[in-house]
Image (tube, rainbow, N blue to C red):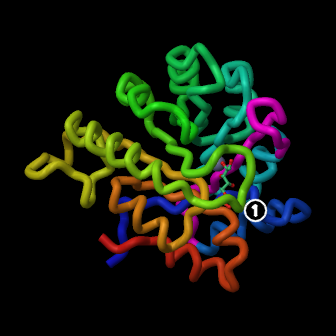
């Protein structure tokens, strides 16, 4: 049975940068639910990737939901440029700004979804305060900055913790995560995304812990067939 509440978000960081429009189309054909776009500033993380012009180019090539992951300091200052470029969701790091609430509120005011990311070393005690102020919590399962790193299993505790609170607050994406007896109409959709080192084995651990969005870069792009690889991440419920 297909797990409908689970979203697969291939990270375009692992794509061929010389053919980004084609790569976006290839992800659409492979059944990607989101396209995850990693924006790095060479400062918050020691790597540089792409900016709003590339997001706009990807947006012209595909109608797939664009999940933009900002690994930059001063995320507030870039919101409008990424909204204009076509981002459907903007996620920034808790560790990158002192204005977390203002930044989340402004992203939502721009009529797109707002996500908040936590690096592996950040305490899970920081998470609950923001659950009613955003649409997604992104839990990094590697240190942000590079694709191709190894999954950090210690982050699973954070995924379980976030899922538990979401269930208590009656915010979740339905499916296996719906609290028992809950009326689906009253459940507020909420996304818990994991990012880094995701392959079929780690995907299963994350989904069992309560994640419902899986980002994957090197596993998908190194696979012989992209569509089969995307399907292999759809952990059964
Ligand atoms: C790392 C990025 C990830 C990365 C995932 O900072 O946020 O999105 O592209 O790549 P893999 O799946 O190769 O770990
Ligand atoms: Zn990412």
**201 to 190, vertically: above or below:** below
Q: Quadrant of residue 218?
A: bottom right
Q: Classify residue 9 by image quadrant.
A: bottom right
| Image quarter in which the N terminus is found | bottom left
Q: Describe residue 131's horizontal placement relative to residue 76 as left or right.
A: left
Q: How packed is label 1: few (under 14 Cα within 10 Å), some, or many (20 or more)?
A: many
Can you identify the residue that label 1 sits on?
A: 14
Look at the image and tell me whether residue 57 can be seen: yes
Where's residue 71, x and y in %?
70, 36
Q: Is mark 1 within 8 Å of ligand 1?
A: yes
Q: Is 44 contained in the magenta span?
A: yes
Left/right placement of residue 103 relative to residue 168 reads right
Q: Quadrant of the C terminus?
A: bottom left
In the visual, does 18 lie left or right of 59?
A: right
- Residue at point 75% right, 62% down? 14
- The residue furthest bottom is 224
Label 1 SS: helix
Main secondary structure of the magenta stretch: loop
Left or right: where does residue 67 sit relative to residue 14? left
Residue range (magenta): 31-49
Q: Position of residue 220 (x, y in %)?
A: 65, 71
């Amino acid at each position: 049975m297909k797990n409908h509440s689970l979203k697969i978000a291939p990270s375009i960081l692992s794509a061929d940068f010389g053919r980004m429009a084609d790569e976006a189309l290839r992800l659409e054909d492979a059944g990607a639910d989101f396209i995850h776009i990693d924006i790095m500033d060479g400062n918050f993380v020691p790597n540089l990737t792409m900016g709003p012009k590339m997001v706009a180019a990807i947006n012209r090539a595909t109608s797939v939901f664009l999940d933009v992951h900002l690994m930059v300091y001063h995320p507030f200052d870039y919101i409008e440029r990424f909204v204009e470029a076509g981002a459907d969701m903007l996620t920034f790091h808790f560790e990158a700004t002192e204005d977390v609430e203002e930044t989340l509120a402004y992203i939502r005011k721009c009529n797109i979804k707002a996500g908040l990311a936590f690096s592996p070393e950040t305490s899970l005690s920081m998470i609950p305060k923001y659950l009613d102020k955003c649409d997604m919590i992104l839990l990094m399962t590697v240190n942000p900055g590079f694709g191709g790193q190894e999954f950090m299993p210690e982050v699973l505790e954070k995924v379980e913790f976030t899922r538990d609170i979401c269930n208590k607050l009656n915010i979740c994406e339905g499916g296996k995560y719906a609290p028992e007896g809950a009326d689906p109409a009253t459940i507020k959709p909420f996304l818990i995304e994991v990012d880094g080192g995701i392959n079929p084995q780690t995907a299963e651990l994350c989904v069992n812990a309560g994640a419902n969005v899986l980002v994957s870069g090197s596993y998908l792009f190194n696979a012989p067939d992209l569509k089969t690889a995307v399907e292999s991440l759809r952990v059964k419920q």
